[in-house]
Image (tube, rainbow, N blue to C red):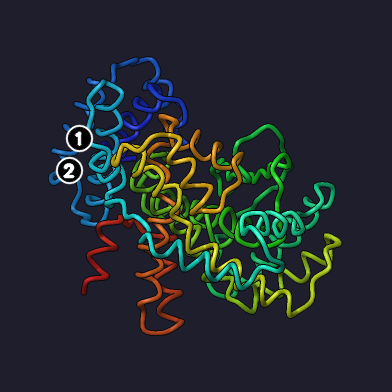
């Protein structure tokens, strides 16, 4: 480990001591984590450390990609520390500094177009939100079958990913079912190329959701990304800074975008429908090939509103609309049930997650545009592999798109 990586880790871990959840994973030397905890420095001091280290980058490494990555990470860390110290920024500026990308709203007319498409695709008549809720309820996988079906989906996706990208030797995942969590699924990366995937059985998991959820968390998403970063950057190049994974920094924007982009890149229409048919068969849900084709169209229509949480956050924190107005927007425009809309608002208002809501849709828009603008399928796979193995940033990707 060089001095640059060591100093970065102390800044990251020190700020992580100030707000629970900022450090999502750490597999570096345990003594550094203890050193950061023992230092017990204030948020204002840590913001200063982040700024000072950023000022030293030009003389600390001659790797331009590494320097840019560390620079953007340190901007995000300084922003987090300043917020904890009581420094308030306009919301859009805070998001932009955290993620190296400016938040974008979904065009309002897109909500109307999606609503029109779903009116035609969903069976029955009457209130669209009720019809969507009935549709979703029919697709729920029985909880007692979920673990076995998730294992099967994982094996299919791992095999498919291995045909397109190399896998680090020795990587592995374990699955477990959990309860009493706010998320549907989570990847806990433990280092040594190992991930623990947890699926929350309290929340209904639908058959049409499962391929995307498992792909996002495992192949070609978070697990493959984290394992390749550890292998290629930490072990082979000695860039120990990747041994900490941070929330509310550009790497989180890239990681969530990678998970979403990879899920759709691997699961094209044909593979997704084939997976869905088998999942439904194993779950005891009646589904014909014609139904699977319609489910693909429904899923892609709903996916066009993936930025709804960010749209709601902009309404709440920028337009200063009331909480009641934003709740109505989530229910009427985004077709959420009252309970789900209220849960979304809780997430958006949480101090840790109030900026994070842009990572999924924003990251996917950026990375999908970059990957799919490649010349052919081989070039697309090569670009995606760069995401798995290099220190890339949102602004760096955006700059490449303009060429």
Task: Tell whether label 2 touches label 1 (CB within 8 Å).
Answer: yes
Question: Which element is circle 1 on?
Answer: helix
- Viewer-side residue, 315 vs 55: 315
Residue found at x 45% / y 52%:
308
Bin the neighbour count of mark 1 within 10 Å (Cα to Cα): few under 14, some 14-19, many 20 and up.
some
Side of 134 where 230 appears, left or right: left
Location of residue 80 by image quarter: top left
- The answer to whether one can see residue 162 in this image is no
Relative to 244, does residue 226 appear above or below in the rendering? Answer: below
- Expressed as whole percent of the image width and height from the top left, the position of residue 173 reads 65, 51
Side of 199 where 300 appears, left or right: left
* Residue under numbered circle 2: 57
Residue found at x 16% / y 32%:
52
Kindly identify which numbered label has been placed on residue 53. Answer: 1
Question: Which element is circle 2 on?
Answer: helix
Location of residue 138 by image quarter: bottom right
Q: Quadrant of the N terminus?
A: top left
Residue found at x 71% / y 62%:
153
């Amino acid at each position: 480990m060089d001095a640059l990586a060591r100093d970065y880790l102390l800044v990251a871990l020190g700020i992580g001591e100030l707000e629970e959840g900022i450090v999502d994973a750490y597999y570096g030397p345990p003594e550094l984590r203890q050193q950061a905890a023992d230092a017990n420095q204030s948020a204002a001091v840590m913001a200063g450390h982040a700024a000072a280290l950023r000022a030293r980058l030009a003389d600390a490494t001659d790797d331009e990609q590494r320097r840019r990555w560390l620079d953007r990470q340190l901007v995000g860390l300084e922003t987090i520390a300043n917020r904890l110290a009581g420094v308030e920024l306009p919301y859009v500026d805070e998001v932009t500094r955290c993620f190296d990308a400016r938040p974008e709203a979904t065009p309002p007319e897109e909500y109307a177009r999606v609503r029109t498409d779903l009116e035609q695709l969903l069976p029955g008549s009457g209130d669209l939100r009720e019809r969507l809720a009935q549709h979703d309820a029919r697709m729920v996988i029985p909880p007692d079958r979920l673990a076995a079906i998730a294992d099967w989906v994982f094996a299919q996706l791992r095999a498919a990913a291995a045909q397109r990208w190399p896998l680090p030797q020795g990587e592995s995942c374990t699955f477990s079912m959990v309860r009493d969590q706010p998320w549907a699924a989570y990847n806990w990366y433990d280092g040594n190329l190992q991930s623990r995937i947890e699926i929350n059985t309290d929340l209904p998991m639908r058959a049409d959701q499962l391929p995307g959820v498992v792909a996002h968390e495992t192949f070609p998403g978070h697990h493959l990304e984290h394992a390749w970063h550890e292998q290629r950057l930490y072990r082979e190049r000695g860039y120990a800074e990747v041994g900490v994974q941070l929330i509310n920094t550009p790497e989180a924007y890239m990681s969530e975008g990678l998970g979403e982009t990879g899920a759709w890149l691997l699961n094209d229409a044909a593979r997704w429908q084939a997976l869905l048919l088998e999942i439904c068969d194993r779950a005891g849900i009646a589904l014909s090939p014609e139904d699977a084709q319609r489910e693909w169209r429904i899923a892609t229509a709903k996916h066009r509103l993936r930025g709804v949480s960010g749209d709601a956050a902009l309404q709440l924190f920028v337009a200063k609309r009331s909480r009641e107005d934003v709740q109505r927007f989530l229910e009427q425009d985004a077709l959420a049930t009252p309970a789900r809309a209220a849960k979304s608002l809780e997430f958006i208002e949480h101090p840790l997650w109030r900026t994070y809501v842009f990572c999924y849709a924003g990251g996917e828009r950026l990375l999908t545009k970059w990957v799919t603008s490649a010349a052919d399928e081989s070039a697309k796979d090569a670009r995606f592999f760069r995401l798995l193995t290099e220190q890339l940033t949102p602004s760096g990707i955006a700059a490449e798109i303009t060429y």
